[in-house]
Amino acid sequence: MAFVNEKISDQDKKRLLSTITFEKVKERDRWIHGFHISTTNTWTCDHDRGVYLVCLVGKGREDDQLAYYALGIENDFVIFKLEDHWLGDESVGMEHHWTVHDLKIPKNLESRKEEIKLFIREGLKESAYFRPFANGGTRDNPNTVERWNILSFNVEFK
């Protein structure tokens, strides 16, 4: 199976809350803004490979500060900042170019760096299509079917 965009189940939410905490993230990147993982309702997940991608959203982020993301893998995670550039619109299609900055991989996962980059590329590509609020989708009942019209997608690591 590949990555899919979905609402996080209650069971997965408990696992997410115990794995990705502000304290653990702060140990890896002291400049992280505050976030509330408990308010995160959706993720991009590959259940077969046991990996997921989630945006760390919440308090304290400045408009010019890049968004932080976490890629959960096994019982650990990597974090990175994401810069998003796109051209076009829904009617003609969009071209996405995402740049990953400051990829922080814990020592126990360093040997899997190339695989982790592949997971990030795949997860971000699927995430780019996600339209959770389309056609009446809400925070509690996101639309997981409707997709953006994307013509091209590229991920670059810096």
Image (tube, helix red, strand yellow):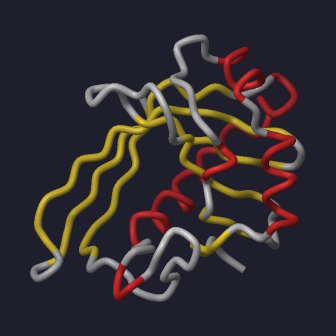
Q: Nearer the viewer, residue 97 or 44?
A: 44
Q: Residue at 87% of width from left, 49% of height from top? A: 74
As drawn, 48 above or below 33: below
Q: Is residue 110 left or right of residue 31?
A: right
Q: Nearer the viewer, residue 46 or 156?
A: 46
Q: Residue at 30% of width from left, 45% of height from top? A: 84
Count of numbered circles in the view:
0
Q: Looking at the picture, how far across and down is residue 7, in whole percent?
A: 64, 72
Q: Looking at the picture, how far across and down is residue 134, in whole percent?
A: 35, 81
The quarter of the picture where the N terminus appears is bottom right
Q: Looking at the picture, how far across and down is residue 95, in whole percent?
A: 21, 63
Q: Looking at the picture, how far across and down is residue 61, in whole percent?
A: 41, 28
Q: Residue at 37% of width from left, 39% of height from top? A: 99
- Figure quadrant of residue 2: bottom right
The quarter of the picture where the C terminus appears is top left
Q: Nearer the viewer, residue 58 or 45?
A: 58
Q: Residue at 76% of width from left, 38% of height from top? A: 20
Farthest residue to the top: give it.
30
As drawn, 54 above or below 156: below
Q: Nearer the viewer, residue 66 or 23?
A: 23
As drawn, 29 above or below 65: above
- Figure quadrant of residue 70: top right
Q: Is residue 51 left or right of residue 44?
A: right
